[in-house]
Amino acid sequence: MSAIKLAPVRVGLLGIGTVGAGTFAVLTRNQQEITRRAGRGIEIAAVADLDVSRARALVGERARVTDDAFSIVRDPSIEVVVELIGGYGIARQLVLEAIAHRKHVVTANKALLAVHGNEIFAAAREQGVTVAFEPAVAGGIPIIKALREGLTANRIEWIAGIINGTTNFILSEMRDKGLPFDVVLAEAQRLGYAEADPTFDIEGVDAAHKVTIMSAIAFGVPVQFDRAHVEGISSLQAEDIRYAEKLGYRIKLLGITRRREHGIELRVHPTLIPSKRLIANVEGAMNAVWVKGDAVGHTMYYGKGAGAEPTASAVVADLVDVVRTLTVDPGNRVPHLAFQPDAMADLPILPITEIESAYYLRLRVADEPGVLADITRILADARISIDAVLQREPAEGERQTDLILLTHVTIEHRCDDAIRQMEALPTVLSKVTRIRLEDLN
Ligand code: HSE
């Protein structure tokens, strides 16, 4: 082994919460191996956190501790800044200020990159620095590396991911134990999976941030979070999970992005997937990303999408990458969004009405002659083909029942029209429940 002669790279850590503490622990524990891989030591030289005494207790005398994060991004002795604060506010100012001071940045902040990524990457290019973000998507799973480098030969066709552990835990528990959403959410909060304010998780926003970033890398388009279609799981009914199961499907919150001829689909919503697919069997708080490339075929990446050391694993991998490229001409580094900045595509993100999907439809109907015929006529007129029909056996004396239809793939606006017509029938007694279905084959 050759001796490592260069001085360690000095890193400033902004925020030492769960992931920050994990990063400190992993870097300390695996210091020797990491140095052998990076070619230089990596030293957390300064830590900023509002809770200075907690930060001090975690790092001891090994790093300068301050509550002034700006003093770190302006410190000339710091070469790399790790941003673990989160959110679009102060984090954006700090990242831009760090870049302006020609520091490389590693960030776990998917919200920031999904919304302000184009501005941040442009600023980084101008200053010749790198913004690395492996921990921002699916925690410890090296999906950014896989998409940007490992699959670089491929024309990527689509990506479908379970990229929010909180909602996957909730859906797994609802299915396993037959519990309603609210009860399981409370359990997820008690176990520390869900945030105290879990809105971003359960309403699909966190997953949409992550799939927006993957979409940009897969297709070479700018990040466009504002064009993503976002639906969460808060209105999902336990009975739909049960009916889906009977028909051979599981319901997962998927982030999906797909290349189509005239644009890109970018969407997050509950989705029926055939139970036999590997991804349908990803349970609890685990994450998985399924990628279809034209050369490689289907690939799947599975692991922990959150937590102290799994996310630290991605932070440290990015630190090593940054250290390895410190001496590389900026024009020869791996581009932030995988494609060269002057070779980005201008494919639009398609509106949700233009996506292609199959559908699960649940209707509460009067149990009388001709109801099924009226509904199937509406679907036939809309050129929507039916794949399966399930009718719940009405209870003794009950005059209404649930009718569940699975359709073949169609364009969403046709399905919207058909649903409007069904809801206008006097025999359809409440709003139609519609959940998208993906075969992923
Ligand atoms: N809150 C996220 C999740 C982890 O539940 O997966 C961080 O993105």
Image (cartoon, rainbow, N blue to C red):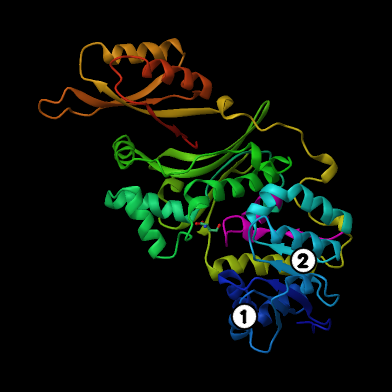
Q: Is residue 296 visible?
A: yes
Residue carrying label 2: 322
Residue 70 percent location from the top left of the image: 77, 70
Q: Relative to 77, does residue 111 appear above or below in the rendering?
A: above
Give the magenta range: 128-148
313 or 392: nearer the eye?
A: 392
Residue 237 percent location from the top left of the image: 34, 40
Which quarter of the image is occupied by the N terminus? bottom right
Q: Secondary structure at mark 2?
A: helix
Distance between the alpha carbons at the discs numbered 1 and 2: 25 Å
- Residue 272, by quadrant, is top left
Q: Residue at x 44, y 58 (%)?
A: 285
Q: Relative to 391, does residue 327 appear above or below in the rendering?
A: below
Mark 1 is surrounded, within 10 Å at the Cα level, by few (under 14), some (14 to 19) or many (20 or more) other residues, namely: many
Residue 141 percent location from the top left of the image: 58, 59
Question: Does the numbered disc 2 mark a residue whose Cβ is under 8 Å from ligand 1?
Answer: no
Looking at numbered disc 1 in the image, what kind of residue is underneath it?
Answer: Ala
Mark before the other along the chain sequence, 1 or 2 = 1
Q: Is residue 151 visible?
A: no
Furthest residue in direction left, as rendered? 396
415 or 407: nearer the eye?
A: 415
Residue carrying label 1: 55
Q: Secondary structure at mark 1?
A: helix
Residue 130 percent location from the top left of the image: 79, 60
Q: Is residue 426 left or right of residue 130?
A: left
